[in-house]
Every structure is written in structure tokens, then in C-alpha cells.
Image: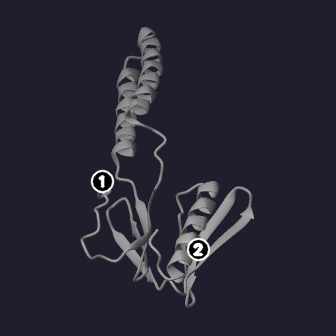
Amino acid sequence: MEMPPAEPPPAGAAPVYFDAVLQQNRSLSMVGAFIVLGVAGAFSFSIAALFASIGAWPVLGFCGLDILLLWLALRHAVKAPKPYETVRLDSRDLRVRRVDAKGRAREWTFQPYWVQVGVQEPNELETHVTLSSHGRTLPVALCLSPPEKRDFAEALKAALRRWREGGRAP
């Protein structure tokens, strides 16, 4: 399942003050997967050839099997749908929607006047961004790096300030 493309709001829709789609970065592309598979295949083939030359020919099948399993795992890793999270602030509410890799969605709604954006940094390698309102706390931006989380939190705080100051368009 691919992430749906952003659609323009219909005419007369509420103005949007903040709209973010947060998605994990895939570090392995299809080209990278083929490179890994080629290197592993060459190594496995050389091991198989060595064992076949000394008469242990059944090892050939096992070396082929490990490359097949590696190919299946890499194909799954590259083509699997990525989970994503959307954070949207419009004139009515602040909505957080999470869609996992299986396509299951969960949604939380906050009244923008009361929501607080919290940033906790227990150490330099860890940063947590939370939305809090009426005793509920929701961690957001889980897939971002610490600097990206700080930037995200500042941008969301600025959008909430604009909303609270009377809803000037962004």
C-alpha cells in the first residue's frame, strides 16, 4: 500500500495551518538490494565451488538456498509498505493519523486551543515530542531524528500560535 497523494482541499474548506506527513526513511534502495545480493551471491558461489571441488557437492544446494532466502528477505524489505503519520491543523481541530505497514489507521483529535506541544530531551541522542491536552498525552514524530523532531515541534508550535492569534492564513 502506498501513501495516498495529498489532495487539494475542496472549495470552501477550512484553512489549513499545518499539514505534515511523517514517514521513515528507507536506507536500502532496490539498487542497493541488488548490490548486497550480488556480493553475497559471489561469496556464496565461491564457497560452494570450493566445497564442490573437494567432493562435498550437496553444499551447492544449501548455498543456493541461502541466496534465495536473502533475495526474498531483501525484496520484502524494499517493497513493503512504509508506515506513516499525518499531523494536520485546520480551523476546527488538530488531527494525528497513523497508518501502520498493514494499512491499519488510528486517529486522534485535539482541540487546538488547549493542546500543548512538549519536547523532552533526556540526552543528546534522544528527543521525544508529545501532544498533551486534558490529561491525554500522545507521542508524535516517532520516526524522525532528534534535530528533525525539534524542527517539527517548533513548526507545530508556530502554527498553533497563528491559530490562537485569530487564524491568520499561513
Sequence order check: which comes first, mark 1 or mark 2?
1
Q: Residue 58 shows which numbered tag?
A: none
Q: Residue at x 52, y 86 (%)?
A: 113
Q: Nearer the viewer, residue 32 or 63?
A: 32
- Position in image of residue 101 (x %, y %): 37, 59
Asked where in the image residue 29 lies, by quadrant, the reply is top left
Establish if 21 lies above or below 42.
Answer: below
Which element carries disc 2, helix, strand or loop? Answer: strand
Inter-mark Cα distance, 1 to 2? 26 Å
Left/right of residue 141 with respect to residue 72 in the rendered view:
right
- 62 is higher (above) or lower (below) than 126: above
- Rendered location of residue 11, percent (x, y): 24, 72
Residue 74 higher or lower than 152, as above or below: above
Label 2: few (<14), some (14–19) or many (≥20) C-alpha neighbours in 10 Å: some
Asked which colour scheme the image uses, the reply is one colour
Q: Amino acid at mark 1?
A: Glu
Q: Which residue is mark 1?
A: 2
Q: Which residue is mark 2?
A: 130
